[in-house]
Amino acid sequence: QVQLVESGGGLVQAGGSLTLSCAVSGSIASVNAMGWYRQAPGKQRALVASITDTDATNYADSVKGRFTISRDNAKNTVYLQMNSLNVEDTGVYYCNPLLFDRLRREWVRAGSWGQGTQVTVSS
C-alpha cells in the first residue's frame, strides 16, 4: 500500500495562490487515478480534484477554474495548484489514490489517509 505525504500548505490572503504536493512512496504510474480532498472546519472530507492515468481531470464546482491538479509519474508526485483562494478554501488537504465505483458512478478513496496539509485563507 502506498504512503502519502502532503505538503505546501500555509497561511495566505484571499486572492493568493498555493501549490500543494503529494509525495507517494510507491509508483503512481500504475494507479488509475489520484485525488485531492479537502476537509473544511466542521465539514466532512470531500473530493475537490481528480486526475486519471490518462491525465483526464475533474473538479468540484467550488474550485473549478481556480484549481489545477497534475501528476508527475517520474517523481511519484501529485500537485494541486490553487489560485484565487478564498476563505471557503480553508481546510486540511489530503491526497489519495482513487478507484471508480461503478455502482455509485463516482471516484472513491482507495488508500489510507496521510497527515494532510493545512491551508488557511485570511480575508
Image (tube, rainbow, N blue to C red):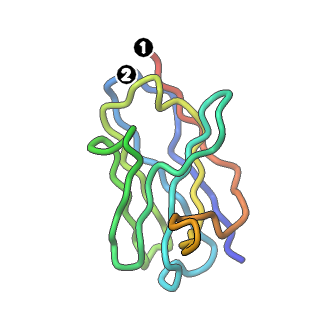
Residue under label 2, please give it.
14
Contact, CB < 8 Å: mark 1 with mark 2? yes
Q: Is residue 1 left or right of residue 25?
A: right
Q: Is residue 122 left or right of residue 84?
A: right
> In which image quadrant can residue 16 be found?
top left
Give the residue at x 69% y 56%.
114
Element assignment for label 1: loop
Q: Is residue 2 placed above or below 84 in the rendered structure?
A: below
Estimate how packed mark 1 is, as few (under 14), some (14 to 19) or many (20 or more) residues with alpha carbons within 10 Å: few
Residues under labels 1 and 2: Cα distance? 5 Å
Q: Is residue 90 placed above or below 66 in the rendered structure?
A: above
Residue 87 x/y as whole percent: 46, 22
Residue 101 x/y as whole percent: 58, 71
Rendered image: mark on residue 85 = none
Give the residue at x 68% y 68%.
111
Give the residue at x 40% y 39%.
18
**Farthest bottom residue in view:** 30
Element assignment for label 2: loop
Q: Is residue 103 placed above or below 109 in the rendered structure?
A: below
Q: Is residue 20 placed above or below 79 in the rendered structure?
A: above
Residue under label 1, please give it.
123
Estimate how packed mark 2 is, as few (under 14), some (14 to 19) or many (20 or more) residues with alpha carbons within 10 Å: some
Give the residue at x 52% y 78%.
28
Quarter of the figure that contains the N terminus = bottom right
Residue 48 x/y as whole percent: 47, 49
Residue 82 x/y as whole percent: 37, 42
Quarter of the figure that contains the C terminus = top left
The amino acid sitting under disc 1 is: Ser
> In which image quadrant can residue 63 be found?
top left
**Farthest top residue in view:** 123
Mark toward the start of the polypeptide (1 vs 2): 2
The amino acid sitting under disc 2 is: Ala
